[in-house]
Image (cartoon, rainbow, N blue to C red):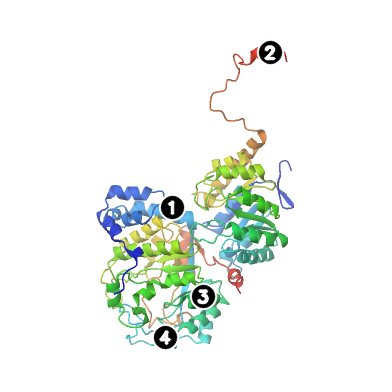
Amino acid sequence: MPPLPEWLDVAPWLALARRADRAMVRQALAAPSPGIREFAILLSSAAAGELEALAARAQALTRRHFGRTIGLYAPLYLSNYCPTRCVYCGFASDRKIQRHKLTPAELAAEAAALKQLGLEEVLLLTGDRLGTAGYEFLRDGVERLAAQFHSVSAEAFAMSESEYAGLAAAGCTAVTLYQETYDPARYALLHTSGPKADYSGRLDAPARALGGGMRSAGLGVLLGLSEPLTDVLRLFAHAAWLRRRFWAGGVAIAFPRVRPQSGDYAAGFPVGESLLAQIVFAFRIAMPETPLVLSTRESPRFRDGMAGVGISKMSVASRTTVGGYASGAAPSSAQFEIEDHRGVEEFGAMLRAKGLQPVFKNWDAVYRAAHA
Amino acid sequence: MEDGFRLGDRTFASRLLLGTGKFASIGAMLGAVRASGAELVTVALRRFNRERPDDDLCAPLAALGGVTLVPNTSGAMNAREAVRAALLGREVTGSPFVKLEIHPNPHHLLPDPIETYEAAGLLVKEGFFVLPYMPADPVLARRLEDIGCAAVMPLGSAIGSGQGLATLAMLQVIVRDAGVPVIVDAGLRSPSEAAAAMEMGCDAVLINSAIAAAENPALMAGAFAQAIVAGRQARRAGLMPRSDTAVPTSPAAALTAFLAGAGD
């Protein structure tokens, strides 16, 4: 098992999170410049008793840095071929599902369907690296989408720095790459074969992405896979380390969760809604200007409640099937089950009713063209 | 116009510039613009959306009478990106003004002095009235003035921070030495801070977060407008000097009375 880098050592913060009391929570909430110390305290069970106070602070900070707005994006699955066995994933190589990768014509149809919805930010997804649906395939997809959308990002396999540079040159502005869990032993158990089984290669990938010229790297753990407190503290440490190393690099955090009640993989360490909300609030308070992202994995009730209260960016109208937008078919082989099926207009109306402006375009292709 | 605010080739009555991000709705943004009386409004090019009218900040602002749009290059990480954004902004709006904003770090959003200086020179040559958002650095302010910027926009404190005039000492030097208008941009939280900026001799103030994040943005916009007028009037009226001790309004006995009999 690879030794963990020194910056992932969160033992003192874990101990602090376990012994924090109410007075420490109050102090952490009032800290003028909070960091990992305050973050740990805000994750404590004492802080769970102060959730309303955490939410109020998180909302105020979200308003300060993002205004009364929510950025919207949609995922677009390019392929569900995958050589890796992640025991929790619907696309894992040992699952007997229908496999498909989009042809250029199908990709054009998907793009047209998303354009029709008025979306301007698209996140392209693939399975792990394969000869048939690998780097060239992804880069080609980025190039095609960048010709039509102002903002294109990718959530795919770990790459080399030069591959990331090539992806950025093709028009990709950001990549998302979840470590899933920072616990190497759990990681090894959950990722038994395929390229993704390389823990260290994945851990270093966001740094390679920023080094290769990506404007932002999206991080996350798949909550439910491992002891959440340790994982979330390490996630914070990872984000903080990247920000120190790449002074002009952006970092975003997302909060995917294995839903305890759905799918055929039972979360070993289930994370309930209250803890999930607490984690989001703690991130907002201790890393106030970081984009925090919530997907349609979560229920409409939870998403409505979290919008603007920590969360600053959300996916909408998502299909997690390959070719899901143009066909409009019911998801038959989705990567994961979606809980929020609302369309763009319905979701936008909910945000507006809450006093939040849905933002479809917050970037411009002119910045990409400046590098052409 | 008595005491008009001269910027580029135009003169404005209002000395409040309004930023237009962060509002809860386009209606709230327009309401704040009207209540502020602002005649110059900045709008980020990245928030122009010609394909989806309910997501477009540019068209509704352009449709407002009496408002000059100032496209903003926010989002640009370097001079090359900012120049492209400025050219596109002018193409869409027809405005000769550009707010030059280059912040490579997406977390603290502080301006890059080197890229800003480089882009400002290129944009001046392109014929823009360049309004550069900049660190409160007196030397940089003069360098930007020397290459032809129409104003300088030093920050009071970081964008959205609400820390007010944290850079006060440097702003004072910039104001004292400036040959172009000084517009304090970013960080102000309250109308009293805007009044203070005007009292110390700034020519105008740009506000966004403090108005957009208020519970009642239009009411706050009006409050800032009044504070800026009050601060400007106070500056023109001439503030009395500060003193550490009480100054009697009718001195009882002048310490220097004996000099009246001096032979010189």
Tell me the chain of label 2: B
Q: CA distance from mark 1 to mark 4?
A: 45 Å
Q: Residue at x 55, y 75 (%)?
A: A169
| Disc nearest the viewer among 4 and 3 | 3
Co-location on one chain, circles 1 and 3:
yes
Q: CA distance from mark 1 to mark 2?
A: 65 Å
Which mark is first along the chain, 3 or 4? 4
Are tags 4 and 3 found on a single chain?
yes
Q: Is residue A142 left or right of residue A186?
A: right
Q: Where is residue B140 drawn, in percent x and y?
A: 62, 52
Q: Say left or right for A149 vs B2.
A: left
Q: CA distance from mark 4 to mark 3?
A: 20 Å
Q: CA distance from mark 3 to mark 2?
A: 83 Å
Query: Helix, strand or loop at disc 3?
Result: helix
Residue indicated by mark 1:
A60
Q: Position of residue B51 (x, y in %)?
A: 59, 70
Does B14 sit above or below residue B69? above
What residue does disc 3 label?
A165
Asked if marks 4 and 2 touch (Cβ < 8 Å), the reply is: no
Q: Is residue A342 visible?
A: no
What residue appears at the point 41 percent right and 48 percent down from the top-left corner? Answer: A32
Q: Nearer the viewer, residue B253 or A41?
A: B253
Q: Which residue type does callout 3 highlight?
A: Ala
Q: In which quadrant is the C terminus of chain A drawn? A: bottom right
Q: Is residue B81 above or below residue A38?
A: below
* Amino acid at circle 2: Ala
Q: Secondary structure at mark 1?
A: helix
Q: Quadrant of residue A317?
A: bottom left
Which is in the foreground here, disc 4 or disc 2? 2
